[in-house]
């Protein structure tokens, strides 16, 4: 907040607009390159995996994400968390 007060809100708004324009320009380049190099044969339904394989892969991804975001991290040191480091 101090930085905004030092340079002014209008300058920060203009800088953010410039950043967003640059990001959109890079995104547009990626879109154009992707569309030019698209291979429609890869989108054929005949090459899709079975529904059970799709569901299994989505479930695996979901549960892996869930496990990585919900498990608590261990304390850095026992000195800083003596109640959770009993017996070490």
Image (spheres, rainbow, N blue to C red):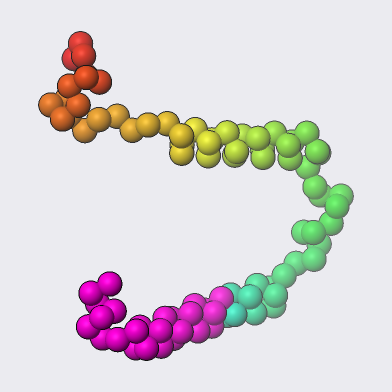
Residue 57 is left or right of residue 78, and the answer is: right
Residue 19 within the segment the image draws in magenta: yes
**Nearest the eye: 77 or 37:** 77
Q: Position of residue 18 (x, y in %)?
A: 44, 86
Residue 64 lies in quadrant: top right
Q: Residue furthest top?
A: 87
Residue found 78% across the figure and 34% down from its top: 52
Q: Position of residue 7 (x, y in %)?
A: 26, 86
Residue 50 is left or right of residue 10, and the answer is: right
Point out the stretch of residues depicted in magenta: 1-27
Q: Position of residue 74 (x, y in %)?
A: 29, 29
Residue found 60% across the figure and 38% down from its top: 62
Q: The C terminus appears in which quarter of the rendering? A: top left
**Nearest the eye: 11 or 29:** 11
Residue 22 visible: no
Q: Position of residue 78 (x, y in %)?
A: 17, 24
Instruction: Give above or below for 9 relative to 83.
Output: below
**Nearest the eye: 22 or 42:** 22
Q: The N terminus appears in which quarter of the rendering? A: bottom left
**Nearest the eye: 58 or 1:** 1
Q: Residue furthest left?
A: 79
Residue 79 lies in quadrant: top left
Q: How many marks?
A: 0
């Amino acid at each position: 907040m101090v930085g905004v007060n030092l340079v002014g809100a209008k300058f920060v708004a203009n800088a953010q607009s410039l950043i967003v324009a640059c990001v959109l320009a890079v995104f547009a380049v990626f879109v154009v390159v992707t569309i030019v190099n698209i291979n429609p044969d890869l989108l054929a339904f005949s090459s899709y995996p079975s529904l059970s394989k799709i569901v299994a892969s989505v479930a695996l991804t979901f549960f892996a994400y869930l496990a990585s975001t919900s498990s608590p991290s261990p304390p850095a040191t026992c000195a800083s968390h003596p109640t959770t480091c009993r017996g070490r």
